[in-house]
């Protein structure tokens, strides 16, 4: 075999082995994803510590149990759902199940009527259905925005079409910052 043939064969083997090693390469997840924000164990919804239980109760108030159940069903972190509940209600849970915002959003998770009735098929006036629908909607937005929690939260506040088109309303940016700040405190 000539030197050139040996060199070509060695180069081909190096390229092929390089291709196989590339298949096992996984790029690091982008910042603001579920795993980056919550870690693998929290995404699995393990709430064994009393510290986390107390903070979840602080964030979700009388709805803490409903938040845990809804988050587990929707496969989203309970502390994310609880933080959304807290921000949507300004920490005031009195009458939150029947609260209507100036924009027309209803209930504990402040679902827009069209989203609640037509998309999520829930009764926004029923606290349990409202929370379950809100958790499912968060899961949908996290999926739509490829796990980017900040963008999903902005979409929860301003609407997914607005965020998908690249708009970043200041109110939505501040909303996402408030929710993420609460999540990080837990």
Image (tube, rainbow, N blue to C red):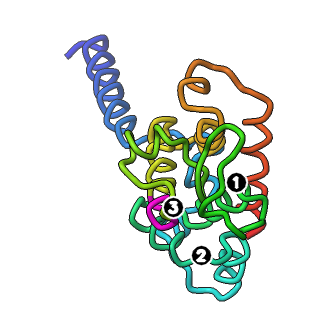
Q: Which comes before the other along the chain, label 2 or label 3? A: 2
Residue 146 sits above or below residue 137 on the image: above
Disc 1 versus disc 2: distance between alpha carbons? Answer: 14 Å
Q: Is residue 85 left or right of residue 23?
A: right
The quadrant of the picture occupied by the N terminus is top left
Residue at figure coordinates x 76%, y 61% from the top left: 182
Determine whether the residue tagged by mark 2 lies in a helix, strand or loop.
helix
Q: Is residue 158 left or right of residue 43?
A: right
Residue at figure coordinates x 51%, y 53% from the top left: 134
Determine whether the residue tagged by mark 3 lies in a helix, strand or loop.
helix
Residue 94 sits above or below residue 2 on the image: below
- The residue beneath circle 1 is 88
Disc 2 versus disc 3: distance between alpha carbons? Answer: 10 Å
Label the magenta part by its dominant secondary structure: helix
Give how far across and how far down residue 170 sits, in percent. Answer: 80, 30
Foreground pick, 37 / 19: 37
Residue at figure coordinates x 63%, y 43% from the top left: 153
- The residue beneath circle 2 is 64
Residue 42 sits above or below residue 172 on the image: below
Residue at figure coordinates x 68%, y 61% from the top left: 83
Question: Start and end of the magenta stretch?
Answer: 127-132
Q: Is residue 39 left or right of residue 69?
A: right
Can you tell which mark lies on residue 131? 3
Furthest residue in direction bottom, as rendered: 50
């Amino acid at each position: 075999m000539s030197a050139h043939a040996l060199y070509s064969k060695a180069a081909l083997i190096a390229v092929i082995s390089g291709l196989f090693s590339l298949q096992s390469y996984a790029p690091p997840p982008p910042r603001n994803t579920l795993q980056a924000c919550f870690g693998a164990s929290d995404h699995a919804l393990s709430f064994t510590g009393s510290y986390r239980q107390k903070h979840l109760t602080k964030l979700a108030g009388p709805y803490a149990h409903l938040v845990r159940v809804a988050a587990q069903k929707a496969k989203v972190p309970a502390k994310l759902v609880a933080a959304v509940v807290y921000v949507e209600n300004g920490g005031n849970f009195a009458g939150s199940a029947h609260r209507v915002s100036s924009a027309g959003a209803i209930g504990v998770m402040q679902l827009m009527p069209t989203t609640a009735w037509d998309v999520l098929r829930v009764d926004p006036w029923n606290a349990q259905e409202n929370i379950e629908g809100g958790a499912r909607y968060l899961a949908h937005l996290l999926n739509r925005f490829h796990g980017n929690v900040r963008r999903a939260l902005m979409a929860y506040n301003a609407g997914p079409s607005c965020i998908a088109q690249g708009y970043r309303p200041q109110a939505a940016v501040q909303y996402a910052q408030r929710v993420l700040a609460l999540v990080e405190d837990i």
